[in-house]
Amino acid sequence: MFNSSLFAQASAEIDSERQAELLHLLKQDCGSCHGLTMKGGLGPALLPENLTGKPVSFLTYTILEGRPGTAMPPWKFLLKPEEAEWLAGVLVRGELR
């Protein structure tokens, strides 16, 4: 289950300018494989209903470390752990705008 208090904490640590940059990254870079509307493509769909049962910690780890043997690259060289957690929270909560 999603822990909204952790998401709120991660949000508080990331300023609004960086949040806007992260949303752009999510739409453009992640969207290039997962679909611009996150409905899937080369990579699986990243809509809340597709992420049910996947903990934010699992999604955060996947963002940071990638998925060996797949096209999913690690983003740990560009994102801080709290930024990856924030992105995972955005996806789980369906807050991509």
Image: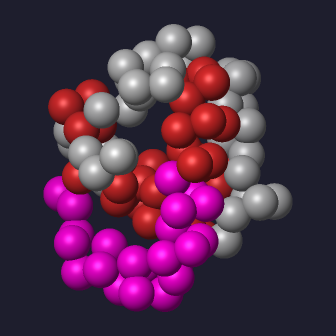
Reply above or below: 72 against 93: above
Q: Residue at x 81, y 59 (%)?
A: 77
The residue sitting at the top extreme is 41
What segment carries the magenta color?
1-23
Q: Look at the magenta stretch and give its main secondary structure.
A: helix
Q: Would residue 7 appear left or right of 79 to someone viewing this image? A: left
Spot occupied by residue 39 in the image (x, y as percentages of width and height): 37, 20
Counting from the top left corner in percent of width and height, residue 96 is at: 35, 46
Res. 45 in view = yes
| Left/right of residue 38 with respect to residue 8 in the rendered view | right
Q: Position of residue 79 (x, y in %)?
A: 69, 63
Rendering quarter of residue 72: top right
Q: Going 25% across and 45% down the picture, which residue do you hit?
A: 94
Q: Is residue 57 left or right of residue 17?
A: left
Task: State the residue at coordinates (61%, 36%).
Answer: 28
Residue 67 appears in the rendering: no
Point out the residue furthest to the right here. 77
Whether 60 is drawn above or below 19: the answer is: above
Report how many numbered discs are placed on residues in the image: 0
Nearest the viewer among 88 and 1 is 88
Residue 42, placed above or below residue 6: above
Q: Is residue 91 left or right of residue 48?
A: right
Residue 76 figure quarter: bottom right
Residue closer to the observer: 83 or 54: 83
User: Magenta stretch: residue 45 in it?
Assistant: no
Residue under the point 30% across and 32% down? 47
Percent across and percent down for residue 45 are 39, 23
